[in-house]
Image: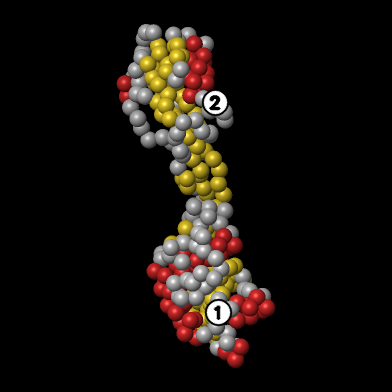
Amino acid sequence: MADESEVEDALCDFIVATLYPGGTEGLDASAPSLAGAPAKVQRGMPLSLDLEAMIRDGVIDIAVAARNGVERVTTRYSRKWEMLIPPVHTITVTPPSQTITLGGTVSVPQNVALGWGPHAHTIHAVQAGESLQDIAAALAAALVAQGAPVVASGTSLTVASGPDLRARVGGFGTMARELKRQDKSFQITIFTPTPELRDDVAKIIDPALANINFLTLPDRTRGLVRYERTIVIDTYEKMTEYRRDLFFWVEYPTITTMQAPEVIAIGSTSGSDDTPRPQRFFP
């Protein structure tokens, strides 16, 4: 669920990636940014003593914070469940035949369905620690109990006679439902030891933020980004502290999520039932 703190984190990550396009892995705090001086990016305004120390050391400080109370309610979409994260299938099955084989790797959560004829069918919920052989044996045992002449051998299942075996694999997707939507103002404050460095940093960050339409948030939703205004502050120039504030609106949703299994039920023995078709999800 996206919170304003997560929007702040996403803005910080974007600014760091903009100032350090090669990444920060292996760099120390003194590594210069694209602006030519080391930069520190964090949520919230710095303490006065910390800011003074950074300015003295020639470090760029960039603070990101939501503006209290400066927001609009923009809720307008229905509360229906939508796919947020599609399922992952790590187990594979061969096409319908007298012998089918399980392949891939075992991971949870997943379901494997097996069917033979009009009435013999089962769904096995994959358990942590199981092997493909364990799954094949469990599927065979369930169909044998229903009268199907199925034999498991390793990762393969074979039927002696009658209709072909049919198998499907279903994963679990993450469904999301939007509860509300807000358009909130966020302030990006740049502190530098010189006005020239302040200009250089702003010329990098401002157009980079203005150039994106959507900001990807930690919960996989996206926030709509729009420029608001800029303020330049020289009040503390006697202390060699130069400041510029950039304001951007970010419209983002608040959601709730749930895991939902794919529908993999196997029905009749007709040929059309064996044809792959789009999977549905519950809820």
The secondary element bearing badge 1 is classed as loop
> Which residue bears the numbered disc 2?
130
The secondary element bearing badge 2 is classed as loop
Using a 10 Å C-alpha cutoff, classify the residue at mark 2 as few (fewer than 14 neighbours), some (14 to 19) or many (20 or more).
few
> Which residue bears the numbered disc 1?
58
Q: Is residue 269 left or right of residue 19?
A: left
Give the amino acid at mark 2: Glu
> What residue is rendered at 36% in x and 32% in y?
277
The image quadrant that residue 57 belongs to is bottom right
> What residue is rendered at 44% in x and 79% in y?
200
The image quadrant that residue 169 belongs to is top left
Position in image of residue 245 (x %, y %)? 53, 79
Position in image of residue 226 (x %, y %)? 45, 70
- The earlier-in-sequence mark between 1 and 2 is 1
Q: Is residue 207 above or below residue 138?
A: below
Q: How many marks?
A: 2
Residue 72 in view, yes or no? no
> What residue is rendered at 57% in x and 87% in y?
240
Give the amino acid at mark 1: Gly
The answer to whether the residues at label 1 and label 2 have Cβ atoms under 8 Å apart is no
Q: Is residue 21 above or below residue 279?
A: below
Camera-side mark, 1 or 2: 1
Position in image of residue 103 (x %, y %)? 42, 26
Q: Is residue 197 left or right of residue 66?
A: left
Outermost residue on the bottom side: it is 238
